[in-house]
Image: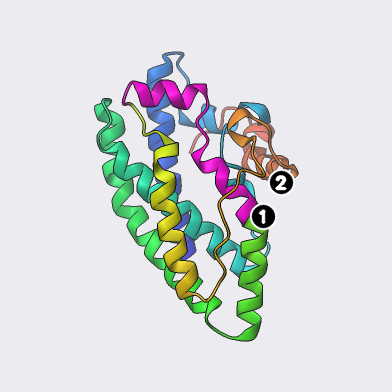
Amino acid sequence: MALSNIALDLIGSARALYQLAGETEGKGRDEDQLAFLRDERAYLNLLLAEYPNTDFAHTILRQFYFSSFQQLYWQAALESTLPELAAIAAKSLKEVAYHHRHAADWVIRLGDGTELSHQRMLAAEANLAPYLGEMFEKDALAGRLADAAILPDPAELQAAFAADRANILTRASLPVADIESRLSGGRSGRHTEAMGHLLAELQYMQHRFPGQQW
């Protein structure tokens, strides 16, 4: 139930961002067109976000990492020079605080729980850790947005993220490895195989019944 509510919150934030993107673009595209009618390479996202759920340990640890990053990102985005974006950040920050708390509690419970849950969390950490560095990469677009104070500089969030991660993993009796950029490319449109499967499901209705609306 909690994960379903978190998903609804994230969909709401995504919709608000897509609406703002469509208005800013000025080409008449709404959030549905931006979400459902783009090719795979046109999606620019963290590879962590497309990682398969695998099991509950992977799902909850991935949610913790994503929520920890989002919480820092939205907090910094409150100072955006774009009022509409600052408003989205304010609403999203309230929601992500719950996401972070829920996921962190489960990471601790599973990591410091039974031998089986501990081993599954160790496996999840080993599999997800290579994706963390991508969160803080600063490409040309991120640099321009940060210079204009529209969005935060992701590189400046790494230290706070690392501290939060170390705190929760230590409490969960899990090792804390260094953050590395071993796997990346999602922000430049280079995705994992999982992305194609996600989009096939996401875009099915619009491809099967073009022009349908909610």
Front residue of 38 and 195:
195
**Image position of 70 (left or right of 125):** left
Secondary structure mostly taken by the magenta-highlighted segment of the chain: helix
Q: Which mark is residue 52?
A: 1
Front residue of 176 and 67:
176
Front residue of 132 and 98:
132
Q: Is mark 2 on a helix, strand or loop?
A: helix
Q: Which residue is drawn at 42% across and 20% down?
A: 144
Q: Where is residue 66 in the image (x, y as percent from the top left)?
A: 49, 52
Residues at circles 1 and 2 in contact by the CB criterion of under 8 Å = yes
First of labels 1, 2 by sequence position? 1
Classify residue 47 by image quadrant. top right
Q: Mark 2 points at which residue?
A: 194
Q: Give the range drawn in magenta.
A: 129-149
How is this picture coloured? Answer: rainbow
Query: Quick check: is 143 in the magenta stretch?
Result: yes
Instruction: Give, as a three-letter code, the residue at label 1.
Output: Pro
Whole-angstrom CA distance, mark 1 to mark 2, is: 7 Å
Q: Which residue lies furthest to the bottom in this view?
A: 114
Q: Can residue 39 be seen in this view?
A: no
